[in-house]
Image (cartoon, grey):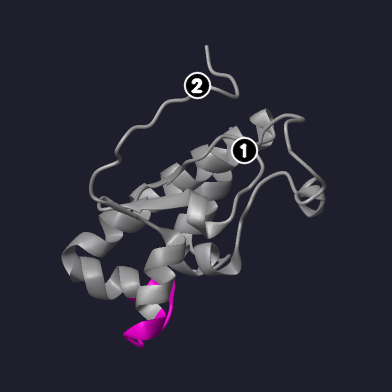
Amino acid sequence: MLDTDFGLVEMVKDSITLSSLKQKIYEKQMGSLRQFFDTYYGRRRADKAKDNFCRSLAAYSLICYFLQIKDRHNGNILLQKSGKIAHIDFGFFFTNAPGKGLAFENPVPFKLLTEYIEVLGGVRSALFQKFRRLFYQ
């Protein structure tokens, strides 16, 4: 059982927080998260990484919606080497939120940023349509 005096920690190998990644992208003037995908993964692997991103983003969005996970800032979202994303730090979910710092997240069921949509190729892309199908199934 987890409580205020006990928790679990697990290492997630080959991953980086989106916050750290975006800082590195900014420092190296690599452009956007989409451009990072194209540069880092290269032409041959970018499509698979973006597909992994799409699938995991749909799952992440649904889980955040159903479990009402809060505290969804980029320091709590990992990008794995495969392109998948994962949420870490489940300290705030359901009605568990200390103070009033997360009140702005209450009306937002999940986090879908413009930069995530850009990685998928935009709202008219086949990958974004796949995201929508996975989310609404």
Residue 99: percent from left, percent from top:
79, 44
Which range is magenta?
26-35
Give the mark toward the camera: 1 or 2: 2
> Residue lying furthest bottom in this view?
29
**Is any part of residue 92 visible from this angle?**
yes
> On the picture, is 84 further left or further right than 123?
left
The numbered dot on residue 85 is none
Residue at 36% in and 88% down: 29
Instruction: Work out which quarter of the rendered image holds the C terminus and state it.
Output: top right
**Neighbours of disc 2 within 10 Å: few (<14), some (14-19), many (20+):** few
Q: Residue at x 26, y 50 (%)?
A: 82
Query: What is the crowding at mark 1: few (fewer than 14 residues within 10 Å), some, or many (at least 20)?
Result: many
- Identified by mark 2, the residue type is Phe
Point 33% across, 32% down: residue: 10
Sequence-wise, the earlier of marks 1 and 2 is 2
Looking at the image, residue 2 lies above or below residue 10: above
Q: Residue furthest front?
A: 5
Could you say where residue 109 lies in the image, as x and y percent from the top left?
Answer: 72, 44
| Relative image position of residue 20 (x, y in whole percent) | 40, 65
Name the residue at the left extreme.
44
Tally the numbered discs.
2
Dot label at residue 6: 2
Q: Marks 1 and 2, Cα distance to the nearest angstrom?
A: 23 Å
Instruction: Find residue 42 and report its horizontal and vertical position in percent.
Output: 20, 70
**Mark 2 residue element:** loop
Which residue matches tag 1?
64
